[in-house]
């Protein structure tokens, strides 16, 4: 039955007369049929948050209940697309309404006419259970889309067909114990606010390799882990998120641009199809999904965009993939929550945020994890959220709730950014709780000295901070030579290793092998300088050493040439011992 | 046209009016309010319920009476008639002319709130705009379609800088239709006159549309003003194919107006009393910038804001910085030392700079040189604080060269005349000239070939 609008206040609309409205049902509001969701039921009234601008909507206009919660269509064609916060494809909206996004556009998330070639993986007659892979479709050159038995269904597979199908075609039939036969379509529908089931979550043991030296070396995130990137504006949050989306070794990337700049989304749209995945050589867009709800798009849809993104990510995880989701920025999502909460006249908590903010944030991050899937396979979902604290002060509620819910903290520092040290991740304040679990992997798979060198480098950086405090009081010249040497090496760690240019074609991505070599070269340099200083050589004398120059240029060495270059560097480091004589002679 | 007048006002506050018995008011609809003495004002529906409409009044409610004041619902959201005839004209916060000229008559009527540009339809901004100001062109380049605010403080020269940019801004090697949309929110008449006079003197007035809301005029109109200006800009850019530079001053006044209205509405306040939706509200202004694929025009925005107490973490600059593509920060310290334009290049940032510079647009050495100047200036400034403690004699020769560089950089590179229009090549050369004062071995950020090609070191060194 149709209801009618009795009140409009911005994105919050009250509707009366709906028959048996349920929480989170999707409502088509007004003559324009704007998309909305029930967020509160009060007697005969349903309170709806509308995902589009409500200007011009009148009291008395009709509203229609679709009797469905906000859901996404999960099917082939998702990869490579760009959606808005409610999974409307932006390119199709453009085709319908032009360069500006008009209201009330009703477009289907996926192409329903396109036919996909389906190949069965199992034969009819076997028993299947929820999550089991029946077959696959080549979605892009990088992604095999797996057709799975939907959750909650098990029984005997009575039919499975090879051939060309659209997303709404049945590719298989499952006869359940109760005698009912269920069709398995190419696509599934899933409500966004409900996490997709898994058997259990496992401890994350494998790092997500990002090719970003400060992250992989010092503050690694695990596949299935959670990370927060809080930082003031201009500190490079978005560039870090873009770098991770480009270079992480995940199979699928879901990038949620939540309340951010329009031009940034355009940048992804123009650069990703041209960039090549370093592992496969295929365009990065072939493993990427974009959810774009820019800051000036409706605020309620911004709230939904995070859930739309994470549900799509979970679905590909269920196929056994390693999925990584970047959300930029979760603060804008929290602000959307606050705005809706204010319209509902709820009692505000800290800084006007609703009191359930913290719960919502931890609920979201809990959807991450390395999981044993319903089909027995293992998949992972890594969640990386940028946070934009007001004034850069992370004592505010969104940052604090996020830090409690995540396990890696990359602290962006405006003073580093102002010195153009990028990525501006502060090495003294950041942490990764996966450190212990992942060091084992790095030591075994990359370099046995990985954790040893890393600890040494970290100690040098901490020592540098201490020495600098002293130096500010007594002056650099008054420092003992050993301390000067520490400053010298720490500078090399900061500038030659931690600092990495996202704009340089080579430096933008470092393989773990290259990272390990670079680090061990710096540690070798340290050992060489340490013994030189012990032998009474002044640090000043070491300045001109060729080894230093070579290490400084290491970041620009292409992967194939690393080995040869390392030999040159090592030779040069050995030469430092020779400075001894000439130094003494002078 | 709806001719029904309601006389059922239940209550009146300083800016709100509650009208009863209204069956079907539209959210955001414009209403006409008639007072007993015949005076007519406008208002907008901000909450519509069955039998009750809450109307926000554009102006003050002085003289309103629950008995005699009448309200008519127009059935239309806020709209503006747009036309190229608007060039050279001045309008107020309701879209009426304030220059004594005729009203704009046009069939082209646009909703002022506008819709968001579809990210799929956007074209990446990449054309370098030469502003003739070295601190911007050399270090924080502006590109067409960018929104680059000026973060200033009271008593600083932001207006002059904005006018200089408007006067000198041009694309390299191109001559296209160019116009300025000026939006003065809550400014005083002296400022309004300054801009008008400057545009007139530079001959830009005929291709300028001015929207002005003086500080004495209604607060509500201040909120509408940028939307009128941007609706005009969008029309001129995307329908008439012009390149539009939008100058908006002062965003701080706009945000204060937003706070004033929000507290009158009794909304839950966010940080420092500003409403929680201020980020979203500001984004609906700033994001109306850019280029669209397949359309010749563009909108570039230079909003100006004064940071209360020079505090960059204050909500107004803070939220702005999160939306805009960089910022030009002015420095009180430089102003005190008489440097014009007093741009703090270390705190300033242009996020789109890299798209607009380089071999094909400015020059191949631009990026590297900018980084080098940046690093050298930062080093020189650090040394200044060190000198304050240990004295200049304690510095090495290299360090002294950097200290000296910082001084010359401020006076000769950042500093320039109000009428001085430097080409980008001049800017880059002057950068190399300054760098030649430091040891060539300290140059690490520019490729060697560029140092050889453009560097100005004496052959002997």
Image (cartoon, helix red, strand yellow):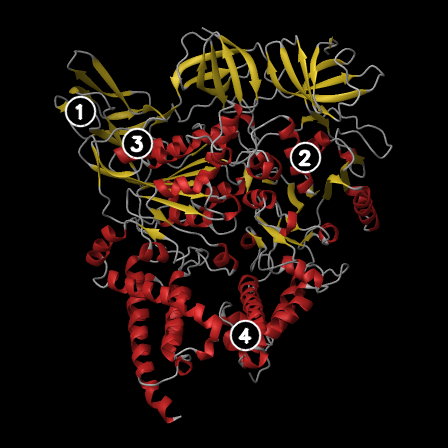
Kindly report the distance in space between the C-alpha atoms of the residues bearing marks 2 and 1.
60 Å
Q: Chain of mark 1?
A: A
Q: Nearer the viewer, residue A261 or A401?
A: A401
Q: Are marks 4 and 3 in contact (CB under 8 Å)?
A: no
Q: How many marks?
A: 4
Kindly report the distance in space between the C-alpha atoms of the residues bearing marks 2 and 4.
55 Å
Q: Are marks 2 and 4 in contact (CB under 8 Å)?
A: no
Q: Nearer the viewer, residue B366 or B329?
A: B329
Mark drawn on residue A505: none
Location of mark 4 (residue): B452
Q: Do marks 2 and 4 both belong to one polypeptide chain?
A: yes
* Mark 2 neighbour class, 10 Å CA radius: few under 14, some 14 to 19, many 20 or more: many
The kind of secondary structure element at disc 1 is loop
Location of mark 1 (residue): A129
* Mark 3 neighbour class, 10 Å CA radius: few under 14, some 14 to 19, many 20 or more: many
Q: Is residue A534 left or right of residue B34?
A: left
- Is B9 situated above or below A263? above
Q: Are marks 2 and 1 in contact (CB under 8 Å)?
A: no
Location of mark 3 (residue): A315
Q: Chain of mark 2?
A: B
Earlier sequence position, callout 2 versus callout 4 = 2
Mark drawn on residue B257: 2
The kind of secondary structure element at disc 3 is helix
Quadrant position of the C terminus of chain A in the picture:
bottom left
- Outermost residue on the bottom side: it is A585
* Mark 1 neighbour class, 10 Å CA radius: few under 14, some 14 to 19, many 20 or more: many
């Amino acid at each position: 039955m149709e209801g009618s609008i009795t009140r409009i206040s911005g994105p919050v609309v009250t509707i009366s007369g709906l028959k048996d409205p349920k929480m989170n049902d999707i409502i088509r509001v007004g003559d324009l049929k704007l998309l909305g969701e029930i967020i509160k039921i009060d007697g005969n009234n349903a309170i709806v948050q509308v995902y589009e601008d409500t200007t011009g909507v009148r009291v008395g206009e009709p509203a229609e209940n679709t009797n469905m919660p906000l859901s996404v269509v999960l099917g082939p064609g998702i990869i490579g697309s760009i959606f808005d916060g409610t999974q409307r494809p932006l390119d199709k909206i453009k085709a319908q309404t032009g360069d500006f996004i008009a209201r009330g556009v009703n477009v289907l998330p996926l192409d329903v006419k396109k036919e996909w070639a389906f190949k069965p993986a199992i034969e009819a007659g076997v028993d299947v259970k929820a999550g089991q892979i029946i077959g696959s479709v080549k979605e892009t050159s990088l992604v095999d889309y797996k057709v799975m038995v939907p959750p909650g269904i098990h029984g005997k597979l009575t039919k499975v067909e090879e051939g060309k199908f659209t997303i709404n075609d049945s590719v298989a039939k499952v006869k359940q114990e109760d005698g009912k036969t269920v069709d398995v379509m190419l696509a599934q529908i899933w409500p966004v606010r409900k996490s997709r089931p898994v058997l259990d979550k496992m401890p994350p043991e494998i790092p997500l390799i990002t090719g970003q030296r400060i992250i992989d070396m010092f503050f690694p995130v695990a596949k299935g882990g959670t990370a927060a990137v809080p930082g003031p504006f201009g500190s490079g949050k978005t560039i870090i998120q873009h770098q991770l989306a480009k270079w992480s070794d995940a199979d699928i990337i879901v990038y949620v641009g939540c309340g951010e700049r329009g031009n940034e989304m355009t940048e992804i749209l123009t650069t990703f199809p041209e960039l090549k995945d370093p592992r496969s050589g295929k365009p990065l867009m072939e493993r990427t999904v974009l959810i774009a709800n820019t800051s000036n798009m409706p605020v309620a849809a911004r709230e939904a965009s995070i859930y739309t993104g994470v549900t799509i990510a979970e679905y590909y995880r269920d196929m056994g993939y390693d999925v990584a989701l970047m959300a930029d920025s979760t603060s804008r999502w929290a602000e959307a929550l606050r705005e809706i909460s204010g319209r509902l006249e709820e009692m505000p908590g800290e800084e006007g945020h609703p009191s359930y903010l913290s719960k919502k944030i931890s609920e979201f991050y809990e959807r991450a994890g390395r999981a044993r899937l319903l089909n027995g396979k293992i998949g992972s979902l890594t969640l990386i959220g940028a946070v934009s604290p007001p004034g850069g002060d992370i004592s505010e509620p969104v940052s604090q709730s996020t830090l409690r819910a995540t396990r890696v903290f990359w602290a962006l520092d405006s003073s580093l950014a102002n010195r153009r040290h990028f990525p501006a991740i502060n090495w003294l304040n950041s942490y990764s709780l996966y450190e212990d679990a992942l060091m084992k992997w790095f030591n075994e798979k990359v370099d046995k000295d990985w954790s040893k060198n890393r600890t040494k480098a970290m100690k040098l950086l901490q020592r540098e901070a201490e020495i600098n405090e002293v130096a500010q009081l007594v002056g650099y010249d008054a420092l003992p030579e050993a301390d000067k040497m520490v400053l010298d090496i720490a500078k090399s760690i900061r500038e030659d290793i931690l600092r990495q240019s996202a704009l340089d074609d080579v430096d933008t991505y470092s393989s773990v092998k290259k990272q390990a070599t670079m680090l061990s070269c710096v540690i070798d340099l340290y050992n060489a300088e340490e013994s030189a200083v012990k032998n009474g050589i002044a640090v000043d004398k070491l300045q001109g050493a060729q080894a230093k120059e070579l290490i400084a240029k290491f970041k620009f060495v292409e992967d194939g040439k690393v080995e040869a270059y390392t030999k040159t560097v090592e030779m040069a480091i050995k030469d430092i011992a020779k400075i001894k004589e000439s130094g003494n002679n002078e | 046209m709806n001719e029904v007048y309601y006389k059922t006002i239940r209550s009146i506050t300083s800016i709100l009016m509650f009208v009863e018995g209204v069956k079907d008011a539209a959210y955001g609809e414009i209403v006409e309010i008639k007072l007993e003495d015949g005076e007519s004002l406008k208002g907008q529906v901000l909450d519509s319920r069955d039998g009750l409409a809450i109307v926000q009044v554009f102006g003050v409610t002085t003289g309103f009476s629950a008995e005699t004041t009448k309200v008519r619902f127009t059935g239309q959201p806020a709209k503006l008639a747009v036309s190229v005839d608007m060039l050279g004209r001045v309008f107020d916060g309701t879209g009426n002319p304030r220059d004594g000229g005729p009203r704009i008559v046009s069939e082209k009527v646009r909703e002022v709130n506008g819709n968001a540009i579809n990210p799929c339809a956007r074209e990446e901004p990449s054309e370098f705009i030469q502003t003739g100001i070295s601190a911007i062109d050399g270090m924080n380049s502006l590109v067409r379609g960018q929104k680059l605010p000026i973060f200033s403080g009271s008593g600083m020269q932001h207006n002059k800088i904005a006018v200089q940019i408007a006067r000198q801004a041009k694309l390299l090697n191109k001559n296209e239709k160019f116009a300025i949309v000026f939006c003065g929110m809550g400014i005083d008449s002296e400022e309004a006159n300054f801009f008008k006079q400057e545009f007139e003197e530079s001959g830009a007035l005929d291709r300028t549309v001015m929207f002005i809301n003086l500080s004495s005029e209604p607060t509500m109109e201040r909120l509408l003003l940028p939307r009128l200006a941007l609706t005009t800009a969008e029309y001129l850019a995307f329908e008439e194919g012009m390149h539009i530079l939008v100058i908006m001053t002062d965003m701080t006044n706009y945000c204060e107006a937003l706070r004033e209205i929000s507290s009158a509405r009794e909304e839950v306040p966010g940080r420092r009393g500003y409403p929680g939706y201020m980020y979203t509200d500001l984004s609906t202004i700033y994001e109306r910038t850019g280029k669209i694929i397949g359309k010749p025009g563009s909108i570039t925005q230079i909003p100006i804001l004064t940071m209360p107490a020079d505090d960059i973490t204050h909500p107004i600059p803070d939220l702005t910085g999160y939306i805009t593509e960089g910022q030009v920060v002015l420095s009180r310290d430089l102003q005190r030392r008489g440097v014009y334009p007093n741009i703090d290049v270390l705190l300033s940032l242009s996020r789109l700079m890299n798209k607009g510079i380089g071999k094909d647009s400015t020059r191949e050495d631009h990026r590297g040189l900018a980084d080098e100047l940046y690093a050298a200036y930062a080093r020189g400034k650090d040394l200044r604080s060190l000198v304050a403690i240990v004295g200049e004699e304690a510095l090495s020769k290299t360090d002294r060269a950097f200290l000296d560089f910082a001084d010359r950089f401020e006076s000769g590179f950042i500093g320039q005349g109000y009428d001085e229009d430097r080409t980008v090549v001049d800017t880059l050369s002057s950068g190399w000239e300054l760098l030649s004062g430091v040891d060539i071995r300290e140059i690490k950020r520019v490729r060697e070939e560029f140092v050889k090609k453009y560097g100005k070191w004496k052959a002997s060194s």
